[in-house]
Amino acid sequence: MQIREQIEYYQKIFSSFGALEGGGITRLLYTDQWYEALKRLELEIKKVGFKSEFDNVGNLFGIIEGYSNEFVSTGSHIDSVVEGGNLDGQFGIVAGLIAIQNLVKKYGKPQKTFQLVALAEEEGSRFPTVFWGSKNVMGIAKKQDVINIKDKNGKKFTDEMKRLGFKFKEENDRRNLGKFVEIHIEQGNLLENLNKPIGVITAITGQKRYDVKIQGQANHAGTTRMCYRKDAIYAYSCIVKEAIEKAVETDDLLVCTFGRVNIIPNTVNVVPGVCEFSIDCRHPDKKILAEFSKWLERRMDEIAIKHKVDIDYKLWMDQEPVPMDKEMIDLIEKSVKELEFDYEIMHSGAGHDSQIFAEFVPTGMIFVPSIGGISHNIHEKTDISDLEKGIKVLEKTLYKLAY
Amino acid sequence: MQIREQIEYYQKIFSSFGALEGGGITRLLYTDQWYEALKRLELEIKKVGFKSEFDNVGNLFGIIEGYSNEFVSTGSHIDSVVEGGNLDGQFGIVAGLIAIQNLVKKYGKPQKTFQLVALAEEEGSRFPTVFWGSKNVMGIAKKQDVINIKDKNGKKFTDEMKRLGFKFKEENDRRNLGKFVEIHIEQGNLLENLNKPIGVITAITGQKRYDVKIQGQANHAGTTRMCYRKDAIYAYSCIVKEAIEKAVETDDLLVCTFGRVNIIPNTVNVVPGVCEFSIDCRHPDKKILAEFSKWLERRMDEIAIKHKVDIDYKLWMDQEPVPMDKEMIDLIEKSVKELEFDYEIMHSGAGHDSQIFAEFVPTGMIFVPSIGGISHNIHEKTDISDLEKGIKVLEKTLYKLAY
């Protein structure tokens, strides 16, 4: 089969697990559809010569042995977001499956051992935990982080894990990955805007996330004069406007998002008394991100004082940028050049399993474009010609690593 | 009984219907607690010599006949908001009940006929309709406005009305009010800030309410550069900041509130694609209010264009200011002066049943202060000495009208 046929073949199969009527997928950790996807994957990899192995928590590994015990790994996560697309994570697994089987078919037994990795969970879309798959592979997942958590229907993580026959790993049990490369859709619109089919990833962005609460005073919208108000949404709006304009003025790569906001009482004729909101700011440079967030905290305090409201903010996520391995970056770039594809050296604005692995093993990432930048959406799509190009880059990279 | 004892007596009784454990009241149209409050009111007014009469929809009238058929009416609404206080509306009924019985006891049969009015519904707190009580009294309520509406639990207005034995009135069946005066808590903090116990109301504010929808584009918070965004909350924040600052700069009496906002998808790591929000702006001068709203509409369009988002706004409430009757204002002011109370000539920033009546009969309003300006809240409170002063003003005004 040609690569395009292989893509269509595997995408059709795996898109059926958790498929939604209107398109797209909901395939969440420790659900039946999730399990069926893994079992089917196990079947398909065996068909083309992989040995398969589950770990305790549900990560699936496919091995094609090489002459040596050194590993070359590729893959991505098998779970999706709620009402997500069928490329986010899934394509990284499909691409690895295609690339490895094609290499073995063409070049025979590799020097190093190929390892296809299907990670159990990355998105945090069912339970309040992320990177459950990759953290367990690296032996850094913590039992206490999940032992009491539930999904939004009240189902316990531990019950759901046990239900399908999975269990906790021993602490510090780290799987051998050797070197790791992941191909993923961009989930942004830079490659599309630049009309380039390949992204060579330098780093995964750092990000800081705040939960903020402004306490003003709820009041009657008609009878409370403006001078007597402590309007939480007015203070909020001043923060949003200023922060976004500051981000734009600071640096092209700095992003700042006010994605979530809830006000109390949220009624047309009551001055908002409370405004609770989130801030998500990211940059691949640690210093720039730190300066921005320091500025932001100072301004929030100053704006609160000016508006006579109380403000309380909690930095609950503080993730440093994770650089990819220099040699891996160079290797991927070399592969793209040899294939004569247009490419962009860029960072990833989204988190990926590669950021977990990169702390332990040489890791690199390849991006393919997202049409309209759309992801986490049933309409998530990438031109098949770009998917094909991505797989060719992956093949060449894996070849250079393993043969 | 002294007025204070009468206030305590009646407030204790009526505050028990729909009482909440933590204090305050929830007493909504066509609920059992609402009905029991009315039945008890009927009992209490009969005790002190009123003849009682329900109309079709649940308004309750108490009559003490005078020598002539000319009516002098007072009262307010018996329903409350969800988790409201026990003065909003209720005090107007209690005050009227106290004032009339005291006058009759002191001065005997009045020249004109006293009519105490307990209006079935004003707040719009259960069904999406307001002034159901007063509009029916005036014969301007429309059957088609309520025939299909439901409460948030899906119960039909018409079923709930019938359940308690009420039904629609004939169209245009207007009750004789003669002249109407209503005493109500201010629900604002002006009187408190000025340290005055009485407000003499000149007009009920005009108000315009908009529902607005900004359509931007939801996008990944990490991978979408700022220059590629169509951020609905950024556009919203620019509108809020500018509108509030414009209102403050325009006129002391102009109020502008962004009370309700909901964004989609409302997730920390997604650029908001949709922002739906309300605007509530009020002023007792028709021209100033019109100019402000015209400016606001123009600016919203301009801001939307600048932010490359779509905006759609619907003006769904457009209420002109309703002036109170000049002679009634003078009469109330005269009464206050004779009692030697401090008072403020002011408008009402909130809507009241009086605005419905004022279009048909000479109407006046008296305010007493709200502690902290708090209303629509279980902590709604007014000093009993101010409640007492209010009733004295009402008594004197009713005396001048009826004897």
Image: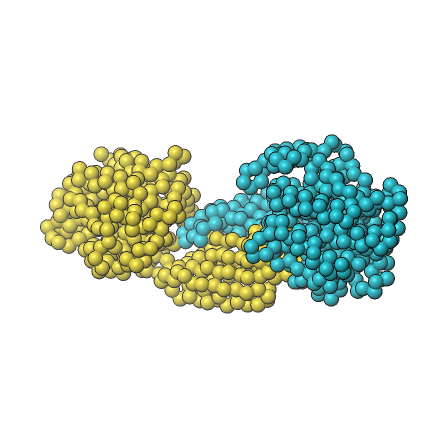
Chain colours: A yellow, B cyan
x then y, percent, for residue A355: 31, 56
In the displayed structure, does residue B236 sit left or right of residue A383? right
Above or below, B53 against A76 in this view is above
Q: How many marks?
A: 0
Judge by depth and name the residue closer to the eye, B15 or B131: B15
Instruction: Kindly identify the residue that appears in the image at 45 percent across and 48 percent down.
Output: B219
In the displayed structure, does residue A258 sit left or right of residue A226? left
Judge by depth and name the residue closer to the eye, A30 or A147: A147
Res. A186 visible in picture: no
In the displayed structure, does residue B396 sit left or right of residue B226? right
Instruction: Kindly identify the residue that appears in the image at 36 percent across and 51 percent down.
Output: A150
Instruction: Kindly identify the residue that appears in the image at 57 percent across and 45 percent down.
Output: B213
Res. A379 visible in picture: yes
x then y, percent, for residue B270: 44, 50
Instruction: Kindly identify the residue that appears in the image at 65 percent across and 62 percent down.
Output: B372
Above or below, B118 against A216 in this view is above
Q: Pick out the residue farthest to the front.
A: B47
x then y, percent, for residue B321: 75, 48
Q: Assign the N terminus of chain B to one quadrant of the image.
A: bottom right
Judge by depth and name the residue closer to the eye, A56 or A83: A56
x then y, percent, for residue A287: 40, 66
